[in-house]
Amino acid sequence: MKEKEVVKAIEDHVSRQNDGWKFIMGKEVLTKQAFLQKLGKDKKFRTTVIALVYNLSIDILTRKSSSE
Amino acid sequence: MSKYIFIRPKFEQVTEITFEEAQDAIDYLKGKGETIIDLAVQDAVREKVETTLKENPDANVAHYDHGNETSWIGNDERAVVDLNNVDLLAGRECYCDNCSSAKTLGIEAWKRKAKAYWGYKDIFYFTTDAKEEFQEFVNNGIKRHVDGYGWKECLEITKQLATELIDKLVKVGKGLAAACLRNDRDILVCYTEDMPPTSDCAFRKLSIKLFGLKVGWKLSKAFPVSVALFAFGLGVLIHDYVDALYHTGGWRQVFSLQGGYFGALILAIGFILAYYEVWSALKHV
C-alpha cells in the first residue's frame, strides 16, 4: 500500500469522527481540523502517524499468526 | 496499607483529562483503605512536592501527566521532580502517567533504589474517542498493585489488558485510538530490583555484561573512552619501544628480557587494579 493511500485512509477515518474529537500527542492537542491540516503539511507528523498505523497492523498480524 | 502521594496538576486541556484519571485511581485506592495525600492543582508545585516527600519518607508517589525524559511537570509548568531532586524517590514506588520520564529520570530513580518505577519511555498518545479505555489502561497497574499483585505481574496484566482494549477498539472502528494504545502499551515499562532497565546503547550493554547491572548502569561514556585511550596509549608506547629495540639490536634485542616490558606489564596491572577498586566501590554504592 502506498503512503498516499494510507494517508487517505487516515484522513477518511478522522473525517468521520465527531467535531469534539481530539488527538493528543504529549503536550500537543489537535482538533479534527488541526489534525487533518498537520497531516497534510507536516512530514514528520505524517511519518509518525503512518508509523502508528503500520505498527498496529504488524502487531495484529503477528498476534493472529502466533496464535494459529 | 500504604500511603500514596498523588501529584496531579491541572492547567490545560490534557491535564484536565489526566486529573480525572488520577481521581479514578485515588477513588479506587481509597476504597482499598490506602492513605492518600493529594497534591492537586496549585499544590502540585516543586516546593510543596519536595516538602511532602521529605515529610513522608515511607509514602509511594504517583504523578499524573506532562513529563519529559528528565522531569515530572507541575502546575506552574516547572519540574516538580527532576535529576536534581531525584534522590527524593529513593525507597519509594513511583507510578507515572506522564510522557517519557522512564527514559532517563526513571533509570536514575532506579539507580537510587526506588522500589519500583512505572512509566513510559517515550511520548504518550491518545484520542478522546476512547477516554475510558485509556483511563482503564493507565490506571490498571496501580489498581492491580493495591489488589496485591507484584509489579512484574501488574506489567504483564496491564500489557495484556492493552492488547484486549486494542482489539476492542479496532472492532468498534476506533482504529487510530487502537494505534495510539499499541504505542503506549509498548513504551510502558516498570523498573524494579528484579526488572532492571534495558538499553539500546552498545557500550551500555557491554558494560552491563562485563560488570553486572549495578555497576554497568553507573558507568558513563567516559569509561569506554578512558579504556580506549589507555589501550591506545600503551599500544603506541610498546610499538615505539619495540621499534627502538629493533633498530638497536634487531630481533634478538626485541625478544630478550627488557625492563621496559616489565614497566608496561606493571602499568597494565596497575590500571586493572585501579579499575577493580572503582568497580568494587561502585558495587556497594
Image: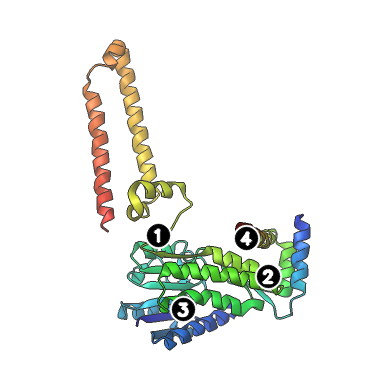
Q: How many marks?
A: 4
The residue shown at (39%, 87%) is B33
Q: Classify 10 Å Cα crowding around label 4: few (below 14), some (14-19), many (20 and above).
A: some
Q: Classify 10 Å Cα crowding around label 3: few (below 14), some (14-19), many (20 and above).
A: some
Asked if the residue at tag 4 contacts the one at tag 1, i.e. Cβ–Cβ closer than 8 Å, the answer is no
Amino acid under disc 1: Pro
The residue shown at (41%, 86%) is B32
Whole-percent x, y for residue B48 in the image: 39, 81
Res. A28 visible in picture: no
The residue shown at (36%, 51%) is B216
Whole-percent x, y for residue B91 in the image: 32, 70
Of mark 2 and mark 1, the one earlier in the sequence is 2
**Same-chain check, marks 1 and 4:** no
Amino acid under disc 4: Asp
- Residue denoted by label 1: B196
Q: Chain of mark 1?
A: B
Whole-percent x, y for residue B281 in the image: 25, 53
Of mark 1 and mark 3, the one earlier in the sequence is 3
Residue B170 - label: 2
Amino acid under disc 2: Val
- Examine the rendered structure and indicate whether residue B105 appears above or below residue B223: below
Q: Work out which quarter of the rendered image holds the N terminus of chain B and state it.
A: bottom left
- Residue denoted by label 3: B143
Whole-percent x, y for residue B159 in the image: 53, 67
- Residue denoted by label 4: A59
Q: Left or right? Give the position of B102 relative to B273.
A: right
**Same-chain check, marks 2 and 1:** yes
